[in-house]
Image: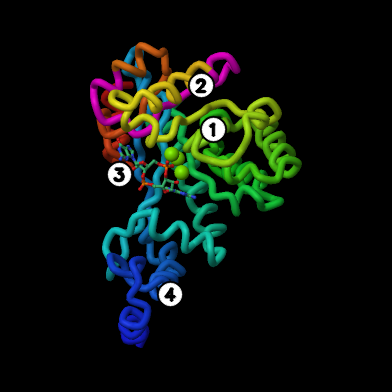
Amino acid sequence: TVKKAGGVRYGFYHNKMTQAFPDKMIMETHLRRAIELNELSLHYQPQVDLQNGEISSVEALLRWNNRKFGAVPPSEFIPIAEDNGLIHSIGAWVIDQACLQLQAWSRQGISNIRIAVNISPQQFAQADFDDIILNALKKYNVEPGLLEIEITESAMSNMNATLSMLKKLKKIGVKISVDDFGTGYSSLNYLRLFPIDILKIDQSFVREIQSECKDAAITKTIIHLAHSLGLEVVAEGVEEMAQVSFLRKEHCQKGQGYFFSKPLPSREMELKLLSIS
Ligand code: C2E
Ligand code: MG
Ligand code: MG
Ligand code: MG
């Protein structure tokens, strides 16, 4: 059986990767059926306005709850899906679900809440990625400005392809953000060339904002850079009040992190939004 084969592999490789989680090939077998078995879901984490505390956007974060493995973190299964091509169907499912959620919220009177979805470089490189977005928006009659596409700098390596895709997305009207900003290899040149709306400061900079003067300097610089370019800026991984104070003082617009809320299941996020709308 599959399980037996996995046991053999465990012993055979016994490397650091396979300690905490089952063998990649076994996981892949299960991941292939995750959509049909209804094992995937989106959780939502609010992005909070640091001046007035309002929530105007949430990030959709994918969760996989498998009968055998339990909750598998995205850091484990997304790389597998990216390696074997499953990311295309999983990614399309995420976009579909986010648009379905936007429709459901709009029908309940929760309006003007934007949902940001994470897009893998492989998805973004698909020639028809813009059609996938457009079709999902149409299917659920969603206002394009309520959908945000989060891409990382690693998705932007091909200058021409990136520019042409971003232009198509811009024309559709979705928002575009750069996730984990500052951790990639790209040059500042792309900020000049690409039609980007939002910078998300990576949580590794925000974490030690209080104690590491280099991290504080980088964070301030990203905030000021965003302001000068007319971009919105979101700090990721905000866990403490001291970080909020710092970010507020530097006029960072939004914060996202455990200080405000962990990612919540759809219904819990909905109740939160209903209570404040
Ligand atoms: P990300 O897009 O940078 O998302 C932020 C991650 O930080 C999330 O981890 C979130 O739960 C976590 N986080 C939020 N607040 C805090 C905090 O205050 N402290 C700390 N330490 N962490 C915080 P998560 O949900 O495990 O996702 C990890 C990564 O997996 C994401 O990083 C994203 O790159 C990827 N991912 C998640 N969902 C999707 C998806 O639907 N598609 C793709 N392609 N990638 C996804
Ligand atoms: Mg993200
Ligand atoms: Mg990321
Ligand atoms: Mg991030």
Estimate the x, y position of residue 226 in percent, counting from the top left: 54, 20
Estimate the x, y position of residue 277 in percent, counting from the top left: 33, 21
Label 4 or label 3, whichever lies nearer to me, is 4
Q: Secondary structure at mark 3?
A: strand
Q: Secondary structure at mark 2?
A: strand
The residue indicated by pointer 3 is: 265
The residue indicated by pointer 4 is: 25
Mark 1: amino acid: Ser
| Quarter the N terminus occupies | bottom left
Q: Is residue 237 magenta?
A: yes
Question: Reading the chain from its start, which is encountered first: label 4 or label 2?
Answer: 4
In space, the residues marked 4 and 2 are separated at their CA atoms by 41 Å
Left or right: residue 258 compared with residue 218? left
In the rendered structure, find residue 232 and report the number of the disc placed on it. Answer: 2
Left or right: residue 156 compared with residue 213? right
Work out whether 40 lies above or below 137: below
Q: Residues within 10 Å of mark 4 (few under 14, many from 20)?
A: some
Label 3 or label 2, whichever lies nearer to me, is 2
In space, the residues marked 4 and 1 are separated at their CA atoms by 33 Å
